[in-house]
Every structure is written in structure tokens, then in C-alpha cells.
């Protein structure tokens, strides 16, 4: 039996559109084992959003892996325990890709290295800002070219707390990418590159005073805000209640705030969000600095 534990991820961290992402302490757990034939997918807690046929993303990733190594996919039983909400900008698709790659790597005894899986995952998802931190943990800065993806992983300080505000509505990445402009002005490009550099350097040296400025973005948030009722107002409120920096998580609609005073912030934000027409839950999380873990027959492998 193979067990994989994969963290949620927040992509487009601040100004790092399609590049900077971070793993969070929220996890999906997936079990897989070979069976004689066919496919059996069991979804614990009966989550109806997860397909239990060949369209299941974990299974599709396993098939892509086996095609790559020119082997036939064995009969499989997959058990999914998902805590990462779907289509909310918290990397649920990346978690499936990462789980599928780890399962296929272990089942086929291919022994691809983590580094090789990082490259495969980024190619499969098309951008590296969810899959890389899901595999490695921490905050990762990735850049893709036609051949591969180069990245740096930064350990995220344990004293950083993230308020993860998750609404009851979904937003597909496809729709959220569709509202982005084809081109942007030099002014907007400079706005983001300067802040992305400031964010990276600040996280590296642990300077949290820069975060409010360093987490600003003008490449995707202003466009996607139109798809998320009250987004700007919520982020402003978060700053009013003491957030050090705020941003849209991935393609949304989840919103994140870097918070120092965890208990007071949560209480104030829950009070405010309860007054909006949509339901929002607020989870206080820390970064995960280790990334996905794999057990084979209960023995932790990596
Ligand atoms: N970087 C991606 C985007 C993350 O914003 O479209 C969502 O998959």
C-alpha cells in the first residue's frame, strides 16, 4: 500500500503570477494499491466533486506517467481523503498531479528523483507555482523555459501565520485566466517585478516589514476581483484588522492575509465576513516547509 500526503498550495503569491507559490498546512491523503484489474476509486466522506472514473485527475496523471515509461497501467484501487477544497485557488489539482506522480513512481518502481518529479509536474500543470511547493514545501520561485523549469525554494519562517479565507463559491482557473489581458503596460510590469523581487528578498532574510508592499499585484488581481464579490473590500478590511500583506490565492476565489495577531484577527474577520451574502470560512494556517510525503507499506520513504 502506498500512502501520499500532499499539502495545499497558494499560487501567484503576491506579485509572483505563475511563478511564486507556497505550501500550506492543509493536506490531502491518498492511498493506492495494485488490484488484479480495473479501477476502483473510493472517496472518503463521499465528496461528490471528485470523479471516481477514468477522468479522476490522480488516475489521469498515473496514466500519463505510465505512458511516458511505455508500460501498461496496472489495476488500481485509490482511496482519496481530501481536505483541500476544490476550485478555490488552493492547489487541489496540483495536489492530484503530485499524488499521481508519486503513486506511479512508487508502483512502477521507476525511482525518478524528486527533482525529476518537480519537472514533470510543472510540465503537466503548465505553470510551476502550485506543483513545485506541493512537492517540496516552503515558498518556491519558479521560471519555465521551453526545456525545463528553474526554481529556488525558500524556507518560510514558522512565526508567519496565514489567514486563509475560503468562500462557498468556486472559480475555475480557465474562467479566471480568461479575464486577463494579453498585454500589460511597462508601468504595470515594473510594479510587479519590483515587488516580486522585494518579496523574494524579504522572505529570504526574514524581513516581514516589507510584506504589505511586497505582496501587491497588478497583473491579475484587478481583473479577477470582478469575479469575486467584495474581494477588494475584504482585503482592505483584513489590512484594517492588522494583516501585514494580503493577496488572491492562485486563480481565486480564496483570499490570504499574513497575520501576526492570530486570535484577534480571526475573530474580527469572521464577524465581518458573516455579514456578507456568501459564506466564508477563515482558517489560520502556517506554511508547510516539507512538501509531499510518501509511505510504502507504512515506511516513510521521502
Ligand atoms: N498561476 C495560476 C493562475 C494558478 O493564476 O492561473 C492557478 O492554477
Image (cartoon, grey):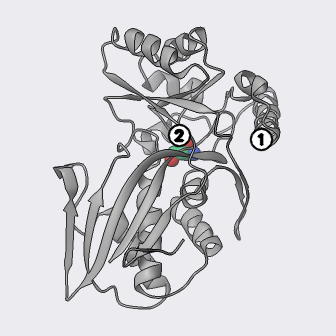
The residue indicated by pointer 1 is: 200
Q: CA distance from mark 2 to mark 1?
A: 17 Å
> As drawn, is 44 to the left or to the right of 201?
left
Please tell me whether mark 2 or mark 1 is closer to you in this view: 1
The residue indicated by pointer 2 is: 250
- Residue 226, horizontal then vertical, whole percent: 48, 22
Splitting the image into four quadrants, where does ligand 1 fall? top right
- Residue 267, horizontal then vertical, whole percent: 43, 14
Looking at the rendered structure, the number of numbered marks drawn on it comes to 2
How many neighbours does mark 2 have within 10 angstroms: few (below 14), some (14-19), or many (20 or more)?
many
Residue drawn 60% across the image and 72% down it: 114
Residue drawn 69% across the image and 29% down it: 215
Label placed on residue 14: none
Residue 160 picture quarter: top right
Element under disc 2: loop
Considering the image in quadrants, where does the N terminus appear? bottom left
The answer to whether the beta carbon of the residue marked 2 is less than 8 Å from any atom of ligand 1 is: yes
Earlier in the chain: of badge 2 and badge 1, it is: 1
How many neighbours does mark 1 have within 10 angstroms: few (below 14), some (14-19), or many (20 or more)?
some
- Residue 112, horizontal then vertical, whole percent: 57, 81
Above or below 226: residue 100: below
- Residue 296, horizontal then vertical, whole percent: 41, 78
Amino acid at each position: 500500500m502506498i500512502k501520499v500526503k500532499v499539502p495545499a498550495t497558494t499560487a501567484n503569491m503576491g506579485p509572483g503570477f505563475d511563478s511564486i507559490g507556497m505550501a500550506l498546512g492543509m493536506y490531502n491523503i491518498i492511498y493506492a494499491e495494485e488490484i488484479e484489474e480495473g479501477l476502483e476509486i473510493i472517496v472518503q466522506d463521499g465528496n461528490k466533486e471528485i470523479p471516481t472514473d477514468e477522468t479522476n485527475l490522480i488516475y489521469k496523471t498515473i496514466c500519463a506517467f505510465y505512458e511516458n515509461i511505455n508500460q501498461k497501467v496496472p489495476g488500481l484501487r485509490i482511496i482519496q481523503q481530501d481536505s483541500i477544497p476544490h476550485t478555490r485557488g488552493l492547489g487541489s489539482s496540483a495536489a492530484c498531479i503530485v499524488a499521481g506522480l508519486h503513486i506511479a513512481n512508487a508502483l512502477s518502481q521507476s525511482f525518478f528523483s524528486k527533482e525529476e518529479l518537480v519537472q514533470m509536474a510543472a510540465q503537466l500543470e503548465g505553470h510551476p507555482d502550485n506543483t513545485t511547493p506541493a512537492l517540496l514545501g516552503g515558498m518556491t520561485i519558479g521560471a519555465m523555459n521551453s526545456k525545463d523549469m528553474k526554481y529556488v525554494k525558500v524556507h518560510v519562517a514558522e512565526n508567519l501565520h496565514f489567514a486563509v479565507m475560503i468562500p462557498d463559491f468556486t472559480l475555475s482557473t480557465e474562467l479566471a485566466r480568461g479575464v486577463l489581458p494579453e498585454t500589460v503596460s511597462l508601468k504595470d510590469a515594473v510594479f510587479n517585478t519590483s515587488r516580486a523581487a522585494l518579496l523574494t528578498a524579504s522572505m529570504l532574510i526574514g524581513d516581514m516589514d516589507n510584506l504589505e508592499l511586497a505582496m501587491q499585484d497588478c497583473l491579475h488581481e484587478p481583473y479577477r476581483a470582478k469575479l469575486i464579490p467584495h474581494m477588494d473590500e475584504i482585503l482592505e478590511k483584513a489590512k484594517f484588522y492588522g494583516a501585514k500583506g494580503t493577496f488572491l490565492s492562485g486563480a481565486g476565489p480564496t483570499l490570504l492575509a499574513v497575520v501576526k495577531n492570530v486570535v484577534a484577527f480571526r475573530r474580527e474577520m469572521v464577524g465581518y465576513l458573516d455579514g456578507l451574502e456568501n459564506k466564508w470560512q477563515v482558517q489560520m494556517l502556517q506554511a508547510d516547509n516539507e512538501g509531499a510525503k510518501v509511505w510504502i507499506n507504512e515506511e516513510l520513504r521521502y
